[in-house]
Amino acid sequence: MGSGAYFKMKTLLTLIALAAASMHTIAADASPRRVSIIEAGAVADGDTVNTGAIQTAIDQLAAKGGGTVVIPKGVFVSGAIFLKQSVNLHLEKDAVLKCSTDMKNFPGQRTRIEGHFEENFTPALVNANGCDGFQLTGEGTLDGNGRPIWDEFWIKRNAATDKKNFKNLSIARARLALIENSRDVTIDGIAFKDSQFWNLHLYRNRGVSVKNARFLVPDDYKQAPSTDGIDIDSSQDVTIDGCYFSVTDDCIAMKGSKGPFAMEDKDSPPVERVRITNCVFKRGYGSLTLGSEATVVRDVVLENSRVIGNMHVLHLKLRPDTPQHYENIRVRNITLDHSGGDILYAKPWTQYFDLKGQSPPKSIVRNITVSNIRGNYGSLGALEGNPGQTDISDITLEDIVVKVKKTGISTRNVRDLKVTNVIVNGQPLTPPSP
């Protein structure tokens, strides 16, 4: 080989080596960063409030381009933490991120709650706003430490002069997670336990997957107030798969706005394209509920699931002060195993009713299908709208074989109710008169 050829070959090999080194550096830089909160000074003693240490870990990762904050085994108490774009949260097995019950650790801020914005209310324990691709994963637990807060709520409510109007927002209490204004979100494996308020609040997101999560209230607590499992608020393209619910309010609720001007609320786009599958509903007010505050909800499926508690399987809350549009709702392939509860329940809902001086609005409920239902339950339920306000039509009950305590279905002003192969206590169901 001549000297010229030798130097050309050496140069080529050098360039290849440099390129390989460069690729290695890029690959190393692209590897996901993981930071344990212990590295940031968090202490797992079940007493120290670790808000600052956890937020420091989040902020430092965000400054470096993102990564995953890891909650290791142990009990870490915290106030409100705020995730940032490209920063995920992972709870390892036997890790517990536990709410402080000193609400000074949850300073009030503007937040979405119950169909509107409160200018100065409690944030969640875990807050993610504008965090596309956010992941909340692991086999650990978000613990709301709710019992003392629930007790305080009932003490104050029972002492109130007007108990009926003692509102859910009358005391400060934290949700476990609020995820908002985000796309392509994943929640996988997490246990949500003893939340002070709602467990998982999804506001104005598009593309959310909730898998293998558990939503829990102790069996010995009769009524933990407002402990909804998942609240899908003004969001689209949501999948809930393989989750377990044992709470004392709605397991899964579709939410939006409320009041006579709700359709004009630009902060409350429709809830659309929700799929719920392979879930178990042990305890709650309703398996799938539309409301309390909701305007447009459409294209929702609950399927391939078991309901083993006394609750409404499908509950349509019909507000007389809110124009509502519920359509294309399907409940199918459900196994029932309880002596109480209603399969389909649509009735007026008047919580915090306020027409604000306006005429009663009109609402539409249509294209509701309940099919392939098997097992034992309390009753088929009721379909009764607000008189003169609610247009209920195109309701289909088909392929239902159940044993119930109360036969028949109560209806009022329902058009096009179709009943096909519905066997109740061994007898075909006779459709009620229109």
Image (cartoon, rainbow, N blue to C red):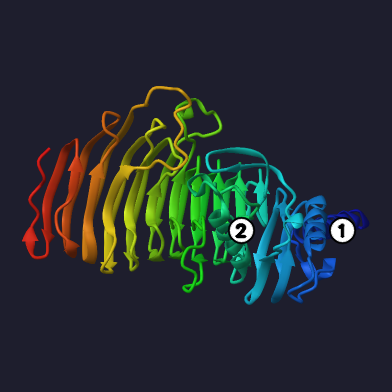
Who comes first in sequence, dot 1 or dot 2?
A: 1
Residue 402 x/y as whole percent: 17, 64
**Quadrant of the rendering where the C terminus is positioned:** top left
Left or right for 313, reference 227:
left
CA neighbours of label 2 inside 10 A, class few (<14), some (14 to 19), many (20+): many
Q: Which mark is residue 378?
A: none
Name the amino acid type tagged 2.
Answer: Leu
Q: Which residue is mark 1?
A: 14
Q: Which residue is mark 2?
A: 176
Left or right for 17, reference 205:
right
Residue ID at (26%, 56%): 343
Image: 167 above or below 52: above
Image: 336 above or below 119: below
CA neighbours of label 1 inside 10 A, class few (<14), some (14 to 19), many (20+): few
- Seen as rendered, the residue at the extreme right is 3
Residue ID at (48%, 26%): 356
Residue 140 x/y as whole percent: 61, 71
